[in-house]
Image (cartoon, coloured by chain):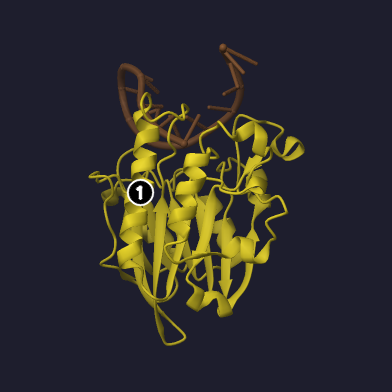
Chain colours: A yellow, B brown
Amino acid sequence: MRIISWNINSLRLRLPLLKELIQLANPDIICLQETKVPDPLFPKEDIEALGYPYIVYRGMKSYNGVCILSKHPIELSSLTKDWCGQEDCRHIAVDFDFLGKPVTLHNFYVPAGGDEPDPDVNPKFQHKLNFLQEVTAWFKDNLSQNSILVGDLNIAPLEHDVWSHKQLLKIVSHTPIETKGLTAWLKTGFVDAMREIVPSSEKLYTWWSYRNKDWEKTNRGRRLDHLWITPTLVPYLQAITVYKEVRNWEKPSDHVPILLELK
DNA sequence: ATGGTGGGCTACCCA
């Protein structure tokens, strides 16, 4: 079972890249964030033609938007929710069968939080902190036994999830209040699958800014995208892959796809 | 301290 998570930064613009990724990674399930397409304009036929007939999506004009594409049957989960009282398309969940077990797969797009890491002056940062609190409280009561949570969580929690821990401590995505919040969410019952495979002492990134033309040379990346699984699924964890080469494709997203492989 | 680059959409918003 191969599951991809990718912040695609406009699904319609990057449909050709999605096709290339499918040829490269051959995923069973694809979770996308920042689709930026309203539901009536979702390119369903194009995606069915790529071999993914089972599709769920929640999109809106210009911003946010998530979807899950699958080769095999999936069902929209009743656990799909709105957060912080906003219908802003940041979460979608599906249920499917894996080796006779019922599994819930959550796909999240956490608010980025703006530039200023002070909730009193920056409402976008306040929203991000509220979002973290709300999801954490909810998962404490509502986590299903076999669950997978993926997505662009917009936080790099560990020292080696950023190119310079010291220089990023006051930068949104790596401030202590955010990294503590993300850890609390993880600890509602998940295991960080990427760090099960890649030791926390090694640098690991999934995002490189558009503003750095020489992104590969300077390598100022952050691990903003995540693959979490419940302990029940850890015995099936086979591999993770960060498709770094996708950052060098023509007209790339600033995030690269990441793959979770369960056997 | 600043500005650097993208996407969506047509006025600036968001990342």
Residue of label 1: A133
Which residue appears farthest toward the bottom when viewing the image?
A100
Rendered residue at 38%/48% (across/down): A132
Amino acid found under the numbered disc labelled 1: Gln
Q: Nearer the viewer, residue A31 or A15?
A: A31
| Rendered view: A74 above or below A136 | below
Is A79 on the left or on the right of A225, as rendered? Answer: left
Q: Position of residue A240 (x, y in %)?
A: 62, 65
Is A174 on the left or on the right of B14, as rendered? Answer: right
Residue A147 visible: yes
The C terminus of chain A - image quarter: bottom right
Rendered residue at 58%/43% (across/down): A252
Rendered residue at 51%/34% (across/down): A172
* Dot 1 crowding, Cα within 10 Å, few <14, some 14–19, many 20+: some
The image quarter containing residue A102 is bottom left
Q: Nearer the viewer, residue A241 or A191?
A: A191
Q: Dot 1 falls on which chain?
A: A
| Rendered view: A36 above or below A136 | above
